[in-house]
C-alpha cells in the first residue's frame, strides 16, 4: 500500500465509523449539532495523530505483554492535554461535548489504530494513517450532524433555515433519529464501495498477540477442529 492509498482508505474504504463501526457511542451522542461534531472530530484527530506517532516511534521499545496499558497511558496523556486546551480556549465546546471528550481515552478508533497499524509501521505511515482516519471520522460525524441538526432543529451551525426552523422533526435529535441516519449513511457507503470494504484476516499472521502466545492458541484450535 502506497502513502496515497494509506491516506484515502480511512475516508471511505475503511471509514472508522461507517465501515469499521468504531466509536459509535460518541458518534451518536455528539452528532446532534455540527459544531459539536467538528469539535469532537478535531479533538479525536489530534489525539489519534499524536498517539500514532509516539507509539510507532516506541514500537520496538514497548514490551508486547504490557503494550495495551502503555498505549492507554500515552493516549490518556494526549487526551488530558487536548481537554485542558479546550477548557481554556473553547469552554462552550467543552460543555457541549461533556463526558465524551475525556472518554476519547477509550475510543476504539484511537486504540484500534495503535494496535493494528502504528504498532507495525513506521512513523510517517502511522501519521498518514492517523490523518486519513481522523478526516474520515470527522466527515462521518459532520454528515450525521448535518442531517440531524437541519431536520431536528431547523438550523445548521446555529444558523436558522427558513421553513425547517418552524417545523423541526424532534425525533432526529434523539437516539432513534441518530440510529436512522447512521444506518442510512452506512448503506450509502456500502453502495459506493460495492460492499467491498477491506476485510482483515485475524489468523496468526494478522494477530498482534502471536509473539506472546507463540502461536500455541492457534495450533490448539486447529487440533480441536
Image: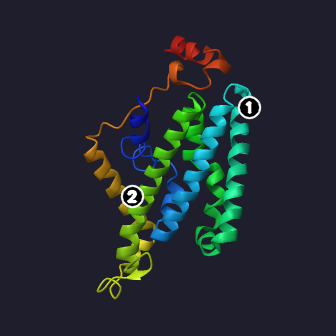
| Depth order, front residue of 54/99 | 54
- Could you say where residue 96 lies in the image, as x and y percent from the top left? 58, 72
Q: 10 Å neighbourhood of mark 1: few (<14), some, or many (≥20)? A: few
Q: Please say if 13 is above or below 153.
A: above
SS assignment at label 1? helix
Q: Residue furthest bottom?
A: 166
Q: Quadrant of the N terminus?
A: top left
Q: Please say if 171 is above or below 79.
A: below
Dot label at residue 218: none
Q: Please say if 85 is above or below 71.
A: below
| Depth order, front residue of 30/81 | 81
Q: Residue at x 53, y 14 (%)?
A: 224
Q: Residue at x 36, y 68 (%)?
A: 147
Which quadrant of the view contains residue 44?
A: bottom right
Residue indicated by mark 1: 66
Q: How is the image coloured?
A: rainbow
Q: Please say if 90 is above or below 76.
A: below
Q: Is residue 39 left or right of residue 15?
A: right
Residue indicated by mark 2: 182
Q: Residue at x 36, y 82 (%)?
A: 168
- Could you say where residue 101 lies in the image, as x and y percent from the top left? 63, 61
Which tag, 1 or 2, sits closer to the chain's start? 1
Report the mark closest to the observer, 1 or 2.
Answer: 1
Amino acid at each position: 500500500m502506497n502513502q496515497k492509498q494509506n491516506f484515502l482508505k480511512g475516508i471511505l474504504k475503511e471509514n472508522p465509523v461507517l465501515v469499521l463501526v468504531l466509536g459509535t457511542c460518541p458518534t451518536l451522542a455528539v452528532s446532534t449539532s455540527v459544531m459539536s461534531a467538528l469539535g469532537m472530530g478535531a479533538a479525536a484527530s489530534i489525539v489519534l495523530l499524536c498517539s500514532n506517532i509516539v507509539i510507532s516511534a516506541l514500537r520496538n521499545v514497548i514490551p508486547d505483554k504490557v503494550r495495551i496499558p502503555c498505549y492507554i497511558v500515552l493516549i490518556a496523556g494526549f487526551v488530558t492535554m487536548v481537554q485542558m486546551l479546550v477548557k481554556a480556549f473553547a469552554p462552550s465546546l467543552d460543555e457541549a461535548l461533556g463526558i465524551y471528550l475525556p472518554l476519547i481515552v477509550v475510543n476504539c478508533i484511537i486504540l484500534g489504530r495503535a494496535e493494528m497499524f502504528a504498532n507495525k509501521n513506521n512513523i510517517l505511515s502511522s501519521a498518514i494513517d492517523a490523518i486519513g482516519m481522523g478526516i474520515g471520522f470527522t466527515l462521518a460525524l459532520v454528515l450525521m450532524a448535518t442531517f440531524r441538526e437541519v431536520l431536528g432543529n431547523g438550523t445548521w451551525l446555529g444558523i436558522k433555515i427558513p421553513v425547517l426552523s418552524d417545523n423541526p422533526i424532534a425525533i432526529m435529535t434523539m437516539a432513534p433519529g441518530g440510529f436512522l441516519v447512521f444506518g442510512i449513511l452506512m448503506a450509502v457507503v456500502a453502495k459506493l464501495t460495492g460492499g467491498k470494504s477491506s476485510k482483515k484476516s485475524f489468523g496468526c499472521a494478522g494477530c498482534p498477540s502471536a509473539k506472546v502466545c507463540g502461536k500455541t492458541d492457534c495450533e490448539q484450535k486447529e487440533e480441536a477442529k
